[in-house]
Amino acid sequence: MIPIDDCKLLVSCCNHKGGLYSVQIQHQQYEMKKILNVGCTGMARYGSSFVVISNSHGIFILDENLKVIKNKPLSTELDLHGLAIDNDKAYIVETKTNSIGIYHLKNDLKRMDEIRISPENFDVSHVNDLYIVNDTLYLSMFSNPLRKSLSSFSSYFPYKPIARGVILEYSLQERNIIKICHDKLYQPHSVLHHDNNLFYCVSGEFLVKRNEEDIFKCLGYTRGLAVKNQTMFIGQSESRHIETLLKKHTNVLLDCGIYVHDISTKLSSFIHIPSEEIYGILVI
């Protein structure tokens, strides 16, 4: 493994062989433990606890020792994806209805409000992840909801090689879309704000970008992203749509795991995860 400060990660894996893993990195070695044996997607720290989303099991709250202390089932029809927390509220991407459901963490996880990105009750833009900075919400999605000429997302899903994805900026205070930060992206995921920069995966191109700059490219589908100092953690999945991707990329690596990448030296190590699809990575 490349030189790296000791740290601990939470890694969520979705769909088949899904689960939640802890990865302890210490003295350039790592130890892995499976925490939940259900498919998981979005994660966020909440005080000394952690909130984890499962499309099949709803909302989990874990204590500082990663023990489940609360679980609230939600409808599996919502197609739950990303999660962010702000002011005791969990903002959860409900992909199927183009919504961000707002759940009160101190009121029995009650759904108190929502943000609608598009009015349709079917997946139009495939909103998938979000990140909150002050009153600004950054969202990644596979198509631009402001393009009125765009037909239903489902009309070209799954995974036709169309670079219509965007990173969108939304004001929580004004409750409206401010602007499109980045566009013409092929399946963006895992948006985060770090050191005054926007980082995100362009999954269909196997890339990680910092603003407009390509800063990492691997040999598989990138999803799941975290940054600590100069170390970047990038998830790589065994894509469910590998045949389509192989038509565009001949050097595809099928292994599922995490790249540990030094942004300064550009050196990387790889940690295998015994799953197929990584969704999120959180440094804890």
Image: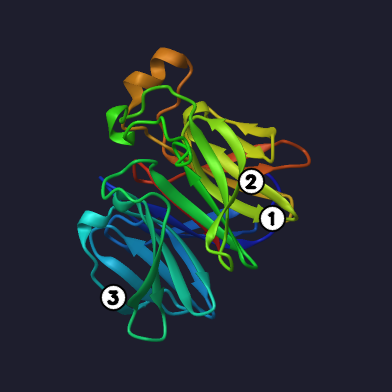
Question: How far, Cα to Cα, is label 2 from label 3?
Answer: 31 Å
Q: Residue at x 41, y 59 (%)?
A: 21
* Earlier sequence position, callout 2 versus callout 1: 1
Q: Residue at x 69, y 55 (%)?
A: 194
Residue 123 on image: x %, y %: 31, 43
**Residue 171, above or below 87:** above
Question: How far, Cα to Cα, is label 3 from label 1?
Answer: 30 Å
Q: Is residue 258 left or right of residue 241?
A: right
**Residue 65, above or below 260:** below
The secondary element bearing badge 3 is classed as: strand
The secondary element bearing badge 2 is classed as: strand
Name of the residue lying farthest toward the front? 148
Looking at the rendered image, the disc whose residue lies closer to the viewer, 2 or 3, is 2
Q: Amino acid at mark 1?
A: His
Residue 245 image-quadrant placement: top left
Residue 180 on image: x %, y %: 59, 42
Residue 226 showing in the rendered view: no
* Way the structure is coloured: rainbow
Q: Residue at x 36, y 46 (%)?
A: 274
Q: Is residue 216 left or right of residue 120?
A: right
Q: Tell me if label 2 and label 1 are in contact, CB under 8 Å.
A: yes
Residue identified by numbered label 3: 71
Residue identified by numbered label 2: 199
Residue identified by numbered label 1: 194
Residue 41 on image: x %, y %: 38, 55
Q: Amino acid at mark 2?
A: Phe
Residue 97 on image: x %, y %: 30, 52
Quarter occupied by the N terminus: top right
